[in-house]
Image (cartoon, rainbow, N blue to C red):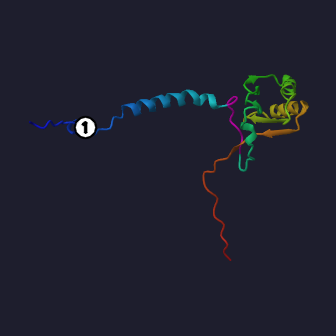
Amino acid sequence: MAIATRAEGKKVNSNINVTPMVDVMLVLLIIFMVITPMLQKGVSVDLAKVNNPTQMPDADKEDALVVAVMRDGQVFFGNDKTPPDQLTQKIKDRLTNKVDKRVFIRADARAKYGSVVEVVDNVRAAGVDDVGLLTEQKKNAQPPAPATGGQ
């Protein structure tokens, strides 16, 4: 009587199969490429750059009221192009049931001063007392020199 042996150990494949991982990564890449443009709220504006901006985390909320002033004087309330003279009524309509009556203004750095002032006046005419002007942090090319305390 002979002993039956199996050669299962010889058939073990120790190579890593990366094809499923590559498939998953390509699907994730496509999903992120499709979703990323949708994450930006409102219209694209080149904000003014300042040294010490004040943080306004409420401007990123879904229900935040944001008015954008483009460099050519066009005004957008959210994603809708709005004539400046109709801005007051639209803001009043949106603020009817809100407790927090705050409006944020995203003005282009090269927008005319008069256009921004007109938008601020229209927002204030809608009964808004708290107006936030959104800016960006200025990028310093060189760090400030360290202070020396020599005598």
Q: Is residue 26 visible?
A: yes
Residue at the extreme bottom: 151
Q: Is residue 134 visible?
A: no
Is residue 60 a member of the stretch shown in magenta?
Answer: no
User: What residue is drawn where x is 83% and y is 33%?
Assistant: 114
The residue labelled by disc 1 is: 12
Secondary structure of residue under mark 1:
loop
Is residue 46 a member of the stretch shown in magenta?
Answer: yes
Q: Image quarter for residue 72?
A: top right
Q: Position of residue 20 (x, y in %)?
A: 39, 31
User: What residue is drawn where x is 29% and y is 38%?
Assistant: 15
Q: Position of residue 148 (x, y in %)?
A: 65, 70
- Please tell me whether the stretch drawn in magenta is mainly helix, strand or loop: loop
User: What residue is drawn where x is 42% and y is 29%?
Assistant: 23
Q: Is residue 135 above or below residue 35?
A: below
Position of residue 116 in the picture relative to residue 35 (left or right): right
Which residue type carries mark 1? Val
Residue range in magenta is 41-49
Q: Image quarter for residue 133?
A: top right
Position of residue 58 in the picture relative to residue 4 (left or right): right
Q: Position of residue 98 (x, y in %)?
A: 85, 32
Query: Observer-nearest residue: 66 or 150?
Result: 66
The quadrant of the image that shows the N terminus is: top left
Q: Is residue 144 above or below residue 29?
A: below
Q: Position of residue 17 (x, y in %)?
A: 33, 34
Query: Observer-nearest residue: 4 or 120?
Result: 4
Residue at the extreme front: 1
Q: Image quarter for residue 136?
A: top right
